[in-house]
């Protein structure tokens, strides 16, 4: 890019020098021609005077006049060179250089990508972005900047578009550029493992299992990796291993939807493997499934809202099971279990009756329990 800019700059400078030189020499040439014309006139006048005085014969006078004309014409011929009388050509050279410089600058502008940045920003401001435009822009940024975050955004965009093979490649590129000791490497590996799983048609593979093992070596309580480990064990008909992995995933998962799916998978693995509760005790013994409904005309959610949904024993303030839920997840069933206890001794397994409370707070508050109760 810099070489192209340098070439265009040199072309412009040289063309300006040439045009200036042409004009300067034209002006200087005009002055010289005027001087030569004056000298020739004076010399012709002297020759005529010499002839009238009798010092020159008519033939000698004629020859001298011919010599004066020849000398003047000879000088003009020698001066008529590239810079002297070619101002017309200089103008065309200048025009050509300007055209090349302008077209070259526009081409470089397009190639460098500033136009894409501007077009993307305009589409974003006018809300004219399409999935295809977003993908194209992310591909351009990944190719141009080659940074971890650019490849990560491209990978997640491919996942959203269900282009899992492309997502795997983008995740692998991001992982190559991410330092081995980076704090967010585990999270990136988790998303990579999921992409590998979906790219294989939702089936376990040795490649996925290798990534999962790498995650669990660093973060043994990572719920998604434990879930995928259970999937791999289930695919190998190792139903006991699947149950154990999925129960650990439930222990560390905080999402009700994931827990409900894991409970269903555990039930299926127990059935196929004929694993009873004496062989492997259930990790969740007591649970409450909660569905929240509200009147949209009376309650409008704000972007910083968060809900605390908890079970409490009458007469006590400390919840025995609690979940934090964002408004966008309220359409899903909320699962409170004996694992969600805040008290060291009392859980849902030790009580027969509880009150359910929904409290609204702001996610930026230091103490979410200071929110207001909006449902019991």
Image: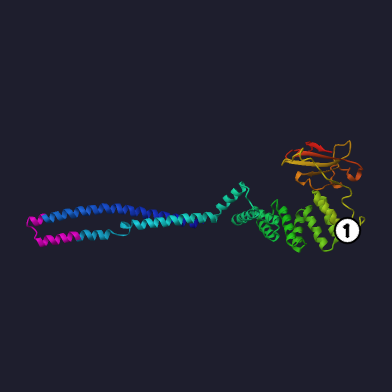
Residue 133 visible within the image = yes
Residue that extends furthest to the front in the rendered view of this protein = 297
On whether residue 58 falls in the magenta region, the answer is yes
Q: Position of residue 301 (x, y in %)?
A: 74, 40
The residue at 69%/52% (across/down) is 182
Residue 63 as seen in the image, left or right of residue 229: left
Closest to the observer, 324 or 123: 123
The residue at 79%/40% (across/down) is 295
Q: Position of residue 270 (x, y in %)?
A: 88, 58
Residue 178 visible within the image = no
Q: Position of residue 238 (x, y in %)?
A: 85, 62
Closest to the observer, 46 or 236: 46
Rendering quarter of residue 297: top right
SS at mark 1? Answer: helix
The residue at 16%/61% (across/down) is 66
In the rendered view, tell whether residue 351 sits above or below residue 261.
above
> Which range is magenta?
49-69
**Which part of the image, by quadrant, shows the C terminus?**
top right
* Location of mark 1 (residue): 270
Q: How many residues crowd mark 1 within 10 Å: few (<14), some (14–19), many (20+)?
A: some
Closest to the observer, 272 or 297: 297
Q: Position of residue 177 (x, y in %)?
A: 65, 56
């Amino acid at each position: 890019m810099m070489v192209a800019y340098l070439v265009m700059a040199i072309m412009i400078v040289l063309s300006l020098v040439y045009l200036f030189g042409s004009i300067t020499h034209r002006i200087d040439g005009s002055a010289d021609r005027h001087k030569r014309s004056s000298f020739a006139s004076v010399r012709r006048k002297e020759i005529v005077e010499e002839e009238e005085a009798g010092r020159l014969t008519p033939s000698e006078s004629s020859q001298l006049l011919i010599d004066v004309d020849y000398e003047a014409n000879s000088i003009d011929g020698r001066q008529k060179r590239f810079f002297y009388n070619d101002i017309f050509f200089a103008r065309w050279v200048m025009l050509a250089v300007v055209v090349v410089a302008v077209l070259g600058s526009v081409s470089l502008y397009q190639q460098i990508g500033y136009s894409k940045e501007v077009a993307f920003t305009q589409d974003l401001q006018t809300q004219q972005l399409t999935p295809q435009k977003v993908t194209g822009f992310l591909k351009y940024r990944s190719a141009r900047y080659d940074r971890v975050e650019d490849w990560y955004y491209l990978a997640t965009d491919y996942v959203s578009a269900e282009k899992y093979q492309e997502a795997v490649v983008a995740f692998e590129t991001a992982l190559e550029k991410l330092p081995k000791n980076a704090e967010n490497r585990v999270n990136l590996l988790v998303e990579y493992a999921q992409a590998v799983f979906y790219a294989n048609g939702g089936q376990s593979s040795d490649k996925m299992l290798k990534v999962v093992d790498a995650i669990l070596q660093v973060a043994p309580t990572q719920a998604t990796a434990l879930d995928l480990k259970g999937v791999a064990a289930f695919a190998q008909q190792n139903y006991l291993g699947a149950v154990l992995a999925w129960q650990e995933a439930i222990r560390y998962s905080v999402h009700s939807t994931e827990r409900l799916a894991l409970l269903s998978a555990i039930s299926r693995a127990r059935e196929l493997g004929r694993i009873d509760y004496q062989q492997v005790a259930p990790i969740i013994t007591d649970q409450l499934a909660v569905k929240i409904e509200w009147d949209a005309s009376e309650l409008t959610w704000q972007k910083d809202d968060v809900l605390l949904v908890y079970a409490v024993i009458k007469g006590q303030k400390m919840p025995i099971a609690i979940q934090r839920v964002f408004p966008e997840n309220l359409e899903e069933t909320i699962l409170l279990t004996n694992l969600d206890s805040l008290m060291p001794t009392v859980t849902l397994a030790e009580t027969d009756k509880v009150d359910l409370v929904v409290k609204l707070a702001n996610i930026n508050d230091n103490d979410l329990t200071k929110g207001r109760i909006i449902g019991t």
